[in-house]
Amino acid sequence: MLGLWILPISMAAGFLGSLLGLGGGIIIVPTLTLLFGVDIRYAIAASLISVVATSSGAAASYLKDHLTNLRVAVFLEMGTVVGAVIGFVLAS
């Protein structure tokens, strides 16, 4: 049953995420866990992969329209990577 719904749910999450500036995880994680009984760890992992794809598409669009300050983006990304590594280490 999950296979039939995964495409429309992921499309809705990507659409709303990019339209509202939210991560698609706000839709994907609750849907997978509450409606389909997916373990929370797997739902979060699936959401993270989905958000990377959505963010990449949105970033490409912003770059094309010259709406991105690359200098700021590089500094934000460096901090994000460091924070992600620290979070991974603490969670393990």
Image (tube, grey):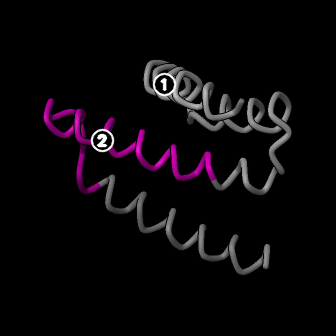
Q: CA distance from mark 1 to mark 2?
A: 18 Å
- For badge 2, the amino acid type reads Ala
Tell me which residue sits at (19%, 40%) in the image.
63
**Which is nearer the N-term, disc 1 or disc 2?**
1
* Residue 19 falls within the magenta-colored stretch: no
Residue 9 x/y as whole percent: 59, 25
Residue 84, percent across and down? 60, 68
Q: Position of residue 86 (x, y in %)?
A: 66, 76
Residue carrying label 1: 11
Residue 76 lies in quadrant: bottom left
- Quadrant showing the C terminus: bottom right
10 Å neighbourhood of mark 1: few (<14), some, or many (≥20)? few
Q: Residues within 10 Å of mark 2 (few under 14, many from 20)?
A: some
Residue located beneath label 2 in the image: 59
> In the figure, 70 relative to 85: above or below?
above
Q: Quadrant of the N terminus?
A: top right
